[in-house]
């Protein structure tokens, strides 16, 4: 890609060519109970499309500038998490906007929230106290849920949220 090589099991938005890349094996890396959720692949793609929205609104470039200017790894990771959970919130807003037309049930929506939870840094690493650049399962699920419950863009402003909400 214009952004280099990605892991074999990943999904990513590449600003270099404005494309989303998605591994066919990605969902197989999650527990079967969540990987088989109705609309699971679309939620992952919606998260990546959230990054495309961030790129088009200068959020990504601004966050990358702030990351480069940050004085510590902890600050850089927190900025990265703010970007990631914002993309989760945008994905929730997308799902909310199509839920009725796609006949998604409340059970389907709960399954999608569990999928997002399973994408947390702590869940993926199996280390409860792991602090990474994407957010904990709880934080990711919370931000996805915010978008799912209310599609006002202001609900997704992770850059003004307290640090403990983007852990």
Image (cartoon, helix red, strand yellow):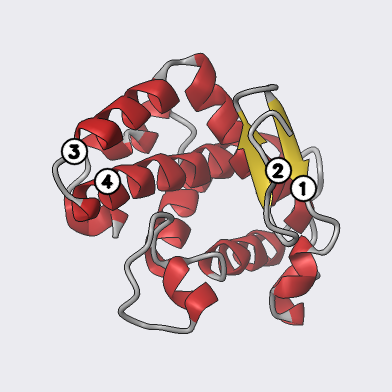
Separation (CA) of disc 2 from disc 4: 25 Å
In the image, residue 22 lies at what x, y percent?
77, 47
Residue 44 visible in the displayed image: yes
Q: What mark, if any, has residue 22 been given in the picture? A: 1
Which comes sooner in the sequence, label 3 or label 2? 2
Quadrant where the N terminus lies? top right
The mark lying in front, picked from 4 and 1, is 4
Left or right of 92? Residue 155 is: left
Left or right of 156? Residue 93 is: right
Task: Check whether the beta carbons of the residues at disc 4 and disc 3 lie within 8 A of each other.
Answer: yes
Separation (CA) of disc 1 from disc 3: 30 Å
From this viewpoint, which residue is outermost toward the front? 4
Element at label 2 = helix
Separation (CA) of disc 2 from disc 1: 8 Å
Q: Which residue is mark 3?
A: 70
Q: Which residue is mark 4?
A: 76
The number of numbered badges drawn on the structure is: 4
Q: Residues within 10 Å of mark 2 (few under 14, many from 20)?
A: some
26 is higher (above) or lower (below) than 81 = below
Q: Nearer the viewer, residue 110 or 14?
A: 14
Q: Residue at x 40, y 40 (%)?
A: 83
The mark lying in front, picked from 2 and 1, is 1
Q: Which residue is mark 2?
A: 45
């Amino acid at each position: 890609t214009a952004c280099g090589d990605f892991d074999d099991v990943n999904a990513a938005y590449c600003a270099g060519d404005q494309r989303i890349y998605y591994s066919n094996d990605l969902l197989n890396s999650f527990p079967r109970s969540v990987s088989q959720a109705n609309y699971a692949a679309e939620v992952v793609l919606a998260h990546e499309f959230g990054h495309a929205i961030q790129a088009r609104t200068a959020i990504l470039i601004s966050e990358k500038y702030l990351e480069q200017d940050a004085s510590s790894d902890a600050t850089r990771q927190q900025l990265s998490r703010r970007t990631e959970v914002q993309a989760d919130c945008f994905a929730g807003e997308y799902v909310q906007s199509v839920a009725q037309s796609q006949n998604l049930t409340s059970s389907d929506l709960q399954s999608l929230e569990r999928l997002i939870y399973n994408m947390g840094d702590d869940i993926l690493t199996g280390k409860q106290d792991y602090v990474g650049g994407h957010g904990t399962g709880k934080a990711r699920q919370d931000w996805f849920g915010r978008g799912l419950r209310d599609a006002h863009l202001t609900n997704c402003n992770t850059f003004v949220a307290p640090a403990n909400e983007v852990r």
